Amino acid sequence: MKSAPSSKSKTEIRRSIRRGLLRWFRNHPRPMPWRSTRDPYRIWLAEILLQQTRVRSALPYYRKFLERFPDMESLARAPFRDVLRAWSGLGYYARARNLHAAAGEILRRFDGRIPDTRTALLALPGIGPYTASALLSFIHGKREGVVDGNVARVLTRLFLVPGNPRSGPVLERLRGIADDLVPARRSRDFNLAMIDIGAAICRPRAPRCPECPLVTHCRARAEDLRERYPEIPPRRKTERVGRLVAVMHRADRLFLVRRPEKGLLGGMWEFPGYDSRAGARGAGRLSRELTRRWKIPVRAAGEPAVAEHSITYRSIRVHAFRATIPANAEIPGGEWIRGRDLARYPITTATRKILERKKS
Ligand code: SF4
């Protein structure tokens, strides 16, 4: 076992960590468009997009949103359907709803300016403790520690903090440590350095300690406990879900239904169907289910198109059958949408995949 880091005073350690991190940050810039701007709207938009989404996936959406909604007012005044359409494909759709609702509130209550207090930020839709700290630090330059999953990993290793960092009390403790470490000046750079080290150096497996500016202070490295920290329990098992859907044409139109406003993928459009694991043998069941639901004869048949899609811990396999109903029969709910108009609708990723399969 290697020797523990030298016993300096807490203040000295804090100073040394700050100095090392800020120096490292100067020499290891990670260019991102939302880092080179001081526009609060852009920084806020990026923070919401980056919740549960990687930088590479968020980038095209960031650009698309700025083209379509260049400022808080244009976003707040846009119909929600347009926001949802711009968001389509990014997942976790509650974020789109919260983004839009928060833009409305910021415009109404704060004259379009992002509030600079934790209480006001936390009262906005879609802003939790992490995002509030990030906005206070990145936009307003406040002395706030920012602890995302990556930073939590760094801190648990640096100070050997036991327990699951996703649990409330441990996360609170980590936030306390981060608040204590962050300097009053250059809090933004300090936090960004921590985030970058967590993302690129202090990786979950095989952390690159020799490149890490924290290496001389790191207890997990000194005691060779890096693989044991953070203490995260095993992931929830993937749940496999089957779904049968009906693809119905009327001339150049397709029939789609809108999901309920609240809940998973709220407000998105998709082919009608239901959860079932019958798979390729499910045409008869789908016919019966939709006949019962709509009270008109529905006939699903043929070889289905198959699309796979994951949402959180659910892995969904969709079988899409061609289906017919009597000419002129009315279906309650839903719309017959022209193929060329589909681009204007926020459709689910599974629906988009089925449309692509049907084209190919
Ligand atoms: S020294 Fe290694 S384990 Fe410690 S914080 Fe740096 S990368 Fe992570």
Image: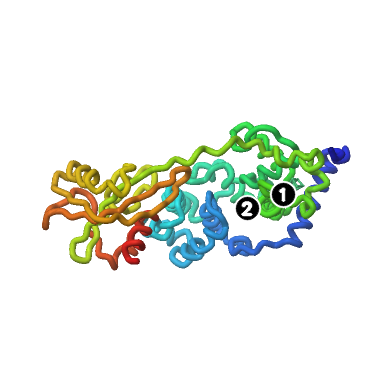
Helix, strand or loop for disc 2:
loop
Tell me residue 128's x, y (percent).
54, 43
Task: Write the residue at 54% across / 55% down.
Answer: 44
From the viewer's perspective, tell me whether residue 266 is left or right of residue 8. left
Around disc 2, counting alpha carbons within 10 Å, would you say few (fewer than 14), some (14 to 19), or many (20 or more)?
some
- Which secondary structure, mark 1? loop
Question: Which quarter of the rendered picture does the N terminus lie within?
Answer: top right
Residue occupying image coordinates x 24% and y 52%: 334
**For this rendering, which residue is in front, 167 or 126?**
167
Q: What residue is pinned by disc 1?
A: 207
Query: Could you tell whether 159 is left or right of 341 in the image?
Result: right
Report the front residue among 250 and 16: 250
In this rendering, position of residue 318 left or right of residue 169? left
Mark 1 or 2, nearer chain start: 2
> In x, y percent, where is residue 224?
78, 40
Q: Amino acid at mark 2?
A: His
Residue type marked 1: Pro
Left/right placement of residue 114 relative to residue 336 reads right
Assign the C terminus to one quadrant of the image.
bottom left
| Comparing labels 1 and 2, the label whose residue is closer to the camera | 1
Q: Which residue is mark 2?
A: 140
**Residue placed most toward the observer, 257 or 187:** 257
Residue 244 position within the rendered picture, expressed as x and y whole percent measured from the top left: 30, 48
Is the shortest distance between ligand 1 and the CB of mark 1 under 8 Å?
A: yes
The residue sitting at 64% across, 44% down in the picture is: 147
**Quarter of the view holding residue 165:** top right
Q: Callout 1: 10 Å neighbours few (<14), some, many (20+)? A: some
Residue 108 at least partly seen: no
- Residues 11 and 108: in front is 11
User: Residue 7 got which mark?
Assistant: none
Residue 99 in the image: above or below residue 240? below
The residue that appears at 44% across and 43% down in the rendered structure is: 314
